[in-house]
Image: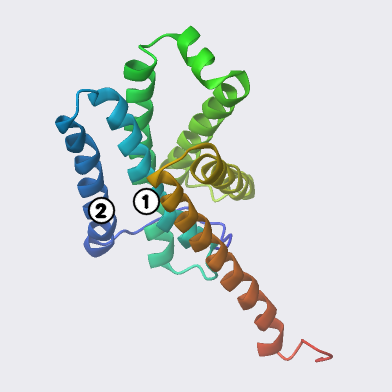
Amino acid sequence: MEFTGRESYSITLTEFTIAFVPFGLLLAAALLAPETTLEFGFYRTVYTIWATTALVTPAMCAFALPGNSDRQRNIWLLFWSFSFACYLVHMSYAVFSVYHGSVQEFLKGQGMFAAVSNVIFTLWWAGDVCLAWFNRSGARWVWVQRVAAHIYIGLTFVASTVFLKHGFINVLGILFTASVLICLMARFDARRRAPLATGKGFGGA
């Protein structure tokens, strides 16, 4: 995506369906699957971060890809929002079930650095989602913070899903990382080709 100076979205029913159906199915599966276990809260915490990772992948890819069509922007917004909604469910179970709503348990279980990082991660993501839906100014600072948010949030997902956690989440994390890198390479390639298309590359006037 590119900065255009506008913050309006006109979402079609098809675009909404493309994002909402996987969100609904993944979140429902993440909440229902633990019914077969004796640790509902713990496994709902685990499964909802799996669902969040799966949902945030198309959002990050849409943001990283070159171009700025209305469909691309709408798909980004919807998956960015639905993945955050799924993440809030994950955080709710983590805080109130795993850590029993205790700040002391949260800090002890996470460690100070990880706890602070998680708070920044959550607030920044929430802030950007709100700006995307409710800000209409098209100010450049919104775009700058959005790029920074995607870098920070994206790297946090890579660190937590590929390196810090173990199990099936690693598969999702590797797919997430590979998908975003491919989209970034496509973006780089598009920018490299742009001067050639206008006759300004390799000595062009």
Residue drawn where x is 43% and y is 60% of the image: 73
Q: How is the image coloured?
A: rainbow
Q: Nearer the viewer, residue 181 or 153?
A: 181
Whether residue 24 sits left or right of residue 163 in the image: it is left
Residue at 22% across, 60% down: 13
Nearer to us in this view, 171 or 86: 171
Residue 21 quadrant: bottom left
Residue topped by disc 1: 54
Report how far apart the C-alphas of labels 2 and 1 lie in the structure: 9 Å
Task: Give the image location of residue 187, x and y in percent.
Answer: 59, 70
Mark 1, secondary structure of its residue: helix
Q: Is residue 49 left or right of residue 135?
A: left
Disc 1 residue type?
A: Ala
Kind of residue sitting beneath label 2: Pro
Viewer-side residue, 32 vs 37: 37
Q: Which residue is mark 2?
A: 22
Tell me whether the residue at label 2 lies in contact with that at label 1, contact meaning CB atoms closer than 8 angstroms: yes
Pick whichever of labels 2 and 1 is earlier in the sequence: 2
Whether residue 42 sits left or right of residue 21 in the image: it is right
Q: Residue at x 42, y 65 (%)?
A: 72
Residue 60: percent from left, percent from top: 48, 55
